[in-house]
Image (tube, rainbow, N blue to C red):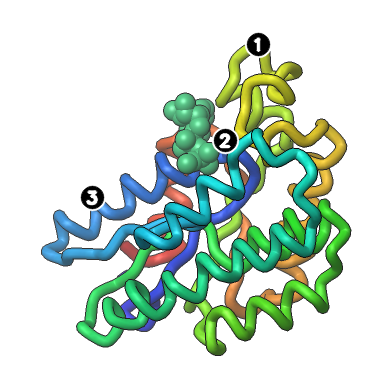
Amino acid sequence: MRDELRFIVLDGVEGCGKSTQIERLAAALREAGEDPVVTHEPGGTPVGEAIRSVLLSPEYPQMTVLTEILLFCASRAQHVQQVIIPALDEGSRVLCDRFSAATFAYQGYAGGGGAEMVEQLDARATGGLAPDLTIILDLPAEEGLRRKFGEQWREASALGDRIEQNDAEYHRLVREGFLAYADRCSERTAVIDADREPDEVFAELAGLLEL
Ligand SMILES: Nc1ncnc2c1ncn2[C@@H]1O[C@H](COP(=O)(O)OP(=O)(O)O)[C@@H](O)[C@H]1O
Ligand SMILES: [Mg+2]
């Protein structure tokens, strides 16, 4: 793999294949003799997992978008300090399922918090640490919901976590938000068409990373 890519993020709408592809990527790196740190947001630390449960619990439908941004950023601040920076300092490669792009797409774009507020708070949370590459797995939002919830996907509003429970229009905007992020941060972002078989998606990912 391209050696300069130390901190790699996979992101995209619900069900786009982040978990599937990150596992395959980690397996390929292990076969090549590496020991990557595989982590995720929100969460990735004990404090972060506690924040995650507040963020995703359907018990809090009243949560405002500013509260969401602050909680995602709180989880990220802890994750960066406790896990990501130490791993990079030790020379490990870090593979992370969701990061700043998700806050931009969900809270900034679909949730209406705005790019500037997300970018300011995110910059404080990361202390300026940016992924070397963010890979957006691009998929129509309803296809991702269908993958996760099957033919009952229209009822994701009753079946999913608090964020999945948002309406179809919100999820459509999340996809647009990821594409807007890719335009805004084009030098460190790549978009892959995830509306294909897992093998085809992985082949493109592997080519991009020169695995
Ligand atoms: N390329 C694909 N085509 C069809 N189904 C997929 C594909 N990638 C993943 N899946 C399936 O879709 C569901 C969601 O995938 P997952 O990797 O968990 O997505 P995410 O982590 O982005 O939410 C899982 O059941 C998974 O097996
Ligand atoms: Mg997942």
Q: Residue at x 65, y 35 (%)?
A: 59
Residue type, numbered disc 1: Glu
Q: Quadrant of residue 186?
A: bottom right
Badge 2 marks a residue whose secondary structure is: loop
Residue 48 percent coordinates (x, y): 45, 60
Task: Calculate the distance from the C-alpha at mark 3 to the C-alpha at mark 2.
Answer: 20 Å
Label 2 within 8 A of ligand 1 by Cβ: yes
Residue 188 percent coordinates (x, y): 58, 76
Q: Residue at x 55, y 64 (%)?
A: 99
Task: Calculate the distance from the C-alpha at mark 2 to the C-alpha at mark 1.
Answer: 14 Å
Q: Which mark is residue 151?
A: 1
Q: Name the mark nearer the viewer: 3 or 2.
A: 2
The residue most toward the left is 33
Q: Can you say whether 89 is above or below 24 in the image? A: below
Q: Which residue is mark 3?
A: 27
Question: In the image, 81: left or right of 34?
Answer: right
User: Is disc 2 surrounded by few (<14), some (14 to 19) or many (20+) residues within 10 Å?
Assistant: many
Residues under numbered marks 3 and 1 in contact, where contact means CB atoms less than 8 Å apart: no
Q: Residue at x 47, y 52 (%)?
A: 204
Residue 10 percent coordinates (x, y): 50, 57
Asked whether the viewer can see residue 197, the reply is no
Q: Which residue is mark 2?
A: 15
